[in-house]
Image (cartoon, helix red, strand yellow):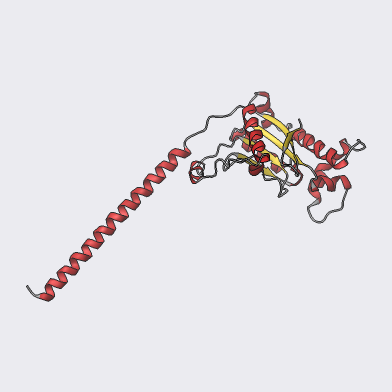
Amino acid sequence: MNPMKRLIERREFLKLGAIGAFSIMATASDLLWQVEQVQAAELSLTTPQPLTPDAALQKLMEGNQRFVQHKPQYPDQSQARLQEVAQAQHPFATILSCADSRVPAEIVFDQGIGDIFDVRIAGNIATREAIGSIEYAVALLGTPVLMVLGHERCGAVTAAVQQESLLGEIGSFVKAIKPAVAKVKGQSGDAVENAVIANVHYQIERLKLSKLLNERLQSGKLKIVGGRYDLDTGKVSIIT
């Protein structure tokens, strides 16, 4: 046989082998990707057993106790959890908290991705938009517990107590806190601390005006509580 012809045939054979090997690898890769997608879909379709309002609150407070004791478990923060909640969410709690950088709900309650529907706004005020977000979480996602979480030495509450003149739109949340400040004006004790507690109660009153939230309350499917976060210790105390 012609040596040149033999060399060409050998090259063609090697080329075909390489193409075949690549096709097998590509097919295996596609198959693996498809399996992973199916597994992720199956995980996302797994709806957790709903908690009662009391059980949901207990889960929150147990997480805070772990945080205070410096024994966090960091639940629901794995790659598997990302896949599980990628297509659907089932948070067990809704929290209206201050936007203060020192009060991140998932950390102080030792929870993870998809556990808390977190609504954060300066002064933990129940604005129209905040209420709408909460209604979505409670009425459509079915969260059984709603906590309004204030915290000590809150800057927004302090500004409302001191009646400071603020720039831009900063004064908008101060205006929303002033009715709470008025309720405790003249009370003995620290004026800001009194106002922090009063503001939590006042915002809860506003939330209870929501027809959607009230229906869940009356049916026993929702519990609304107020909390106070201690910046020094990390402890959350129930105040309602």
Please tell me whether residue 122 is drawn above or below residue 50 in the rendered image: below
For the point 55% across and 39% down, the residue is: 89
Please tell me whether residue 148 is drawn above or below residue 100 in the rendered image: above
User: Is residue 10 shown left or right of residue 145?
Assistant: left
| Figure quadrant of residue 129 | top right
Q: Quadrant of the N terminus?
A: bottom left
Q: Nearer the viewer, residue 180 or 60?
A: 60
User: Is residue 123 shown left or right of residue 133?
Assistant: right
Can the viewer see residue 179?
no
User: Is residue 137 shown left or right of residue 100?
Assistant: left
Residue 56 placement (x, y as % from top left): 62, 31
Residue 166 placement (x, y as % from top left): 83, 54
Q: Residue furthest toward the left? A: 1
The number of numbered discs placed on residues in the rendered structure image is 0
Q: Quadrant of the C terminus?
A: top right
Q: Nearer the viewer, residue 219 or 226?
A: 226
Q: Residue furthest toward the right? A: 186
For the point 81% across and 40% down, the residue is: 196
For the point 32% across and 55% down, the residue is: 26
Q: Nearer the viewer, residue 134 or 20?
A: 20
For the point 85% across and 46% down, the residue is: 160
Residue 218 placement (x, y as % from top left): 68, 24
Can the viewer see residue 116?
yes
